[in-house]
Amino acid sequence: MSDIKTYRKQMSQTRNGSTEFMANSQGLQRTDASYIHLSREQQQLREEIARLRQEEQQLCEKDVWVKKNIVAIP
C-alpha cells in the first residue's frame, strides 16, 4: 500500500513540476515577446531622436543664415 501512495505522490510531484516548467516556458515566451517589442520601440525612438537632431541642426543653420542676412533698416 505504501508503495502505491509513494508512487502516486511522486507522479503528482512530477506532474506539478511539469506544469511549473510549462508555466515558466510560457513566461519566457512572454518575456521574449516583451523584449522584442521593447527592442523595436527602442529602435524607433533612436530613429526619431536621430531625425530630430538632424532637424535641429538644419534649423540652427537656417537661424545662422538668417542672422547673417539681416539688414538693418535705417
Image (cartoon, helix red, strand yellow):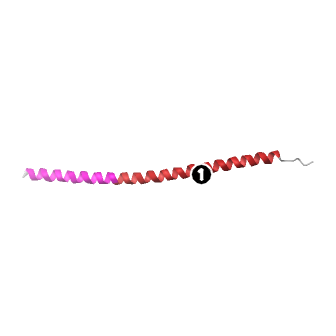
Residue at 41%, 52% (x, y): give it: 32
Residue at 12%, 50% (x, y): give it: 6
Whether residue 44 sits left or right of residue 36 in the image: it is: right
How many other residues sit within 10 Å of disc 1, few (<14), some (14-19) or many (≥20)?
few
Whether residue 44 sits left or right of residue 53 in the image: it is: left
Whether residue 55 sits left or right of residue 1 in the image: it is: right
Whether residue 47 sits left or right of residue 31 in the image: it is: right
Query: Which kind of residue does numbered mark 1 sit on?
Result: Glu
The spot of residue 69 in percent (x, y) is: 83, 47
Q: Quadrant of residue 64?
A: top right
16 magenta-colored: yes
Outermost residue on the right side: it is: 74
Mark 1 sits on what residue? 48
Residue at 44%, 53% (x, y): give it: 34
Outermost residue on the left side: it is: 1
The main secondary structure of the magenta stretch is helix
Label 1 secondary element: helix
Residue at 53%, 50% (x, y): give it: 43
Bounds of the magenta segment: 2-25
All told, the count of numbered labels is 1
The spot of residue 16 in percent (x, y) is: 24, 53
18 magenta-colored: yes
The spot of residue 19 in percent (x, y) is: 27, 54
